[in-house]
Every structure is written in C-alpha cells, then in structure tokens.
C-alpha cells in the first residue's frame, strides 16, 4: 500500500515538472556541464528557456558573475546562435570571453541610457527564438517585471540572464533560479608562473523545484569542474587534461 502511494506521489511530481516546462533529459548531451551544480535542478538538467537571476553586492561579485556566465554561454551557443548583452554601464571586456570559449563577435552588445530601456529591450529580445541567450544588467527588478520576462521565454525557449549589480534588496521574483557568484582564489601549478584557472564560490540561493546549495567550481580544460574533484587529481593528470582540453 505504501509502495503504491510513493509511486503516485512520484508520478505527480514528474507531471508537475512537465506542466511547468521541465522536461526530462533526452540524452547526456542535454547537460550543460555544471557537474554537481546541475544535479540541483529538476531532472538534473540546467533549465534553458528560463530566467536566471545573478545577484551581486559589489564590483568583484559582478565580475565573477560575468565570468561564470561566459562559461554557461559557451555551452548555450555551441550550435552557432548569437547572444544579446544589454546594459547601461557595461564593464565587460569582450576579448576576455575567448578565455571561456566564446567568440566576442557572436555577442551583440546594446548599451542603453536608462534601466527601463534595458527591461523593455530584454523582454523584446527574449521573444526572438533565433537567439541562444539574452543578458540584461540591472540594479532592480520586481516580481511583475520578472514575470513578463519569464512569460517571454516560455514561448521562445531562449535563456535569459539578469545580472543585478549592487542590488539593494533581492526581493521576490519569478526567476527559475537565483545565483550568487563570488570570486575564489585560484590554485597555482607547482613550478609554474602566473595565476591558476578561474574559480568561483557558486551559490544557488533559490531554484524552482530544485535544491539550493553551494559549490567551489573551477573553469579548467574548457569546462566547469568541481574543485574538490580537481584536488584529488595529480598535477601530472591535470596538466595532461588541460593540454587535451
């Protein structure tokens, strides 16, 4: 009897996810490559066709969010589609995107005068299914505004990213996930000059139908990797992996 109840509850949970637009993965290729972070999402897959909110409290966190997001865009744009990046005070240095496998000429930058124009342009761009993603830099966004963005992507299946720079209070939004990305010290290879590969303290503060959590992630060999896993590898293994990556 208990087994039947569990089966019914499990099926209802699957049905609810389908009704809300979360489809089970068709293959391993559906994964975006976030490792343990990705398992926090419904069905263990990063939800494309949704709005993701990145909150930052200072310029350092904003820069970290942009870098981490570049890694996400590398996966979303691998089919050849373009991305639109909208802001009023852009700090991103486009050539830096190449470090994450993104060609700068595939990013269209729109630098506007007012944040209300950013919201309008973002909503309109998210309706264009020819784009892989749309990024909008804002200070504040309320529930109604975020709901309008979410409704736009539910039809187009374009992925939207909202970077909230120096936000006073996150408040409630309709976004599928709320992230906080903090810079983390890189690990320098023994006997090698310079600095190591980018690292972030990745926090999922809120995720619809998922499990919030925190992870230490590194961009290595052209992909995201958990730093804990990297620590278990020998220096020789890591050097070989990066050469082939």
Image (tube, grey):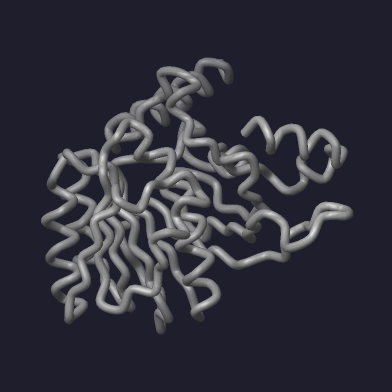
Q: In the displayed structure, does residue 102 sit left or right of residue 222?
A: left
Residue displayed at 38% across by 34% down: 78
Residue at point 24%, 56% (across, down) = 108
Q: Position of residue 168 (x, y in %)?
A: 41, 84
Which residue is located at x 33 percent, y 78 percent? 139
Is residue 240 left or right of 93 when viewed as pictured?
right
**Which residue is farthest bottom?**
168
| Residue 203, position as x, y percentages in the image | 57, 59
Q: In this view, does 237 lie above or below 110?
A: above
Q: Quadrant of residue 154?
A: top left
Position of 64 with respect to 227 (left or right) is: left
Quadrant of the rendering where the N terminus is positioned: top right
Between residues 240 and 135, which one lies in front from this camera angle?
240
Instruction: Tell me where residue 237 sits by quadrant.
Output: top right
If the image is split into quadrants, where does the C terminus sit? Answer: top right
Q: Where is residue 23 in the image (x, y as percent from the top left)?
A: 35, 28
- Please name the residue shown 28% across and 72% down the image: 141
Residue 233 lies, in percent from the top left, at 83, 37
In front of the other: 235 or 132: 235
The answer to whether residue 47 is above or below residue 66 is above
> From what the image shows, is residue 157 above or below residue 109?
above
**Residue in front for this viewpoint, 107 or 50:** 107
Tell me where residue 136 sits by quadrant: bottom left
């Amino acid at each position: 009897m208990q087994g039947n109840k569990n089966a019914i509850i499990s099926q209802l949970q699957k049905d609810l996810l389908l009704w809300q637009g979360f489809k089970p993965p068709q293959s391993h290729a559906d994964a975006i490559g976030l490792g343990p972070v990705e398992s926090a999402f419904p069905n263990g897959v990063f939800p494309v066709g949704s709005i993701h909110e990145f909150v930052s409290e200072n310029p350092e966190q904003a820069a970290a969010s942009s870098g981490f997001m570049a890694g996400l865009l590398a996966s979303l744009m691998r089919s050849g589609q373009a991305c639109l990046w909208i802001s009023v005070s852009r700090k991103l240095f486009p050539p830096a995107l190449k470090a994450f496998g993104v060609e700068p000429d595939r990013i269209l930058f729109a630098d506007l005068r007012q944040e209300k124009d950013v919201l309008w342009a973002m909503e309109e761009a998210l309706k264009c299914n020819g784009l892989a993603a749309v990024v909008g830099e804002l200070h504040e966004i309320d529930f109604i505004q975020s709901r309008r963005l979410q409704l736009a992507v539910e039809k187009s299946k374009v992925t939207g990213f909202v970077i909230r720079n120096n936000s006073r209070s996150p408040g409630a939004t309709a976004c599928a996930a709320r992230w906080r990305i903090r810079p983390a010290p890189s690990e320098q290879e023994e006997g090698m000059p310079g600095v190591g590969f980018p690292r972030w303290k990745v926090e999922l503060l809120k995720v619809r139908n998922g499990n919030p959590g925190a992870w230490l992630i590194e961009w290595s060999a052209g992909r995201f990797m958990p730093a804990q896993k990297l620590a278990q590898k020998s220096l020789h293994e890591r050097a070989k992996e990066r050469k082939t990556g």
